[in-house]
Image: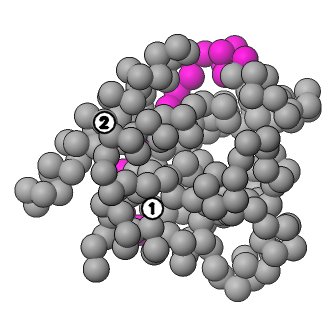
Amino acid sequence: MNNGLLFIISAPSGGGKDAVIAKLIKIFPRSSRLVTTTSRTPRPGELEGVNYYYISTEEFKKKIANDEFVEYNFFAGNFYGVEKVILNKFLSNNDIIFATTEVNGKHNFDKLKIANLGIFLLPESLEIQQNRIEKRGGTTEKSLKERLDIAKNEILESKDYPYHLVNKDGAMQETVEKIEEIVRNELSKRANA
């Protein structure tokens, strides 16, 4: 069985993870974005099985009770998680898998000894981070404050990621190129191992 190389790309809420991964998938053949499961409702334009697998909070709790997740977290009022069966399917069918797991999720992968490479996207500043979240919409003042508090904590907790990049506003292509270089270097190491 072919085991794909798993890259975990983390960033505070609104940090550009999904947009960066969309560009990386176009660069690398046989790569895919790991689709995770959430109890939150879809945002406008999001699609089932593309952005997330959307299930109810009750269904999510049943899956937790049945030990169906590699990792899961409760974030800003909703559950998010990686289902074991879905992760195995992606690892079997792709050479490269990009996952948008947050910091605690990455730490759970590490505890379970699931091989991964972590890349943390930092904002230029928390003010810019706040603007990104506001632009995206769908947040109340309370949830905006929660997300910013979580962002501060995630930045502190990301110290054990092997890679940290500042994802500058208006310079996403630069971020994509830096990650492309990291991925190519890691693929080369793997081929020569």
Q: Which residues are magenta?
A: 112-131
Question: Which label's residue is closer to the chain start, 2 or 1?
Answer: 1
What is the three-letter code of the residue carrying label 1? Asp
Q: Residue at x 48, y 34 (%)?
A: 20
Give the SS element for disc 1. Answer: helix
Label 2: which residue?
180
Q: Amino acid at mark 2?
A: Glu
Q: Is residue 4 above or below residue 129?
A: below
Q: Can residue 116 be seen at all in this image of the molecule? A: no
Residue 127 magenta: yes
Viewer-nearest residue: 38 or 70: 38
Mark 1 closeness class: few <14, some 14–19, many ≥20 residues within 10 Å? few
Of tags 2 and 1, which is closer to the observer? 2
| Residue depicted at x 26% and y 34% | 181
Which one is nearer the viewer's eye here, 113 or 183? Answer: 183
| Secondary structure of the residue carrying numbered label 2 | helix
Q: Which residue is mark 1?
A: 110
Query: 1 and 125: which one is in front?
Result: 1
Q: Are marks 2 and 1 in contact (CB under 8 Å)?
A: no
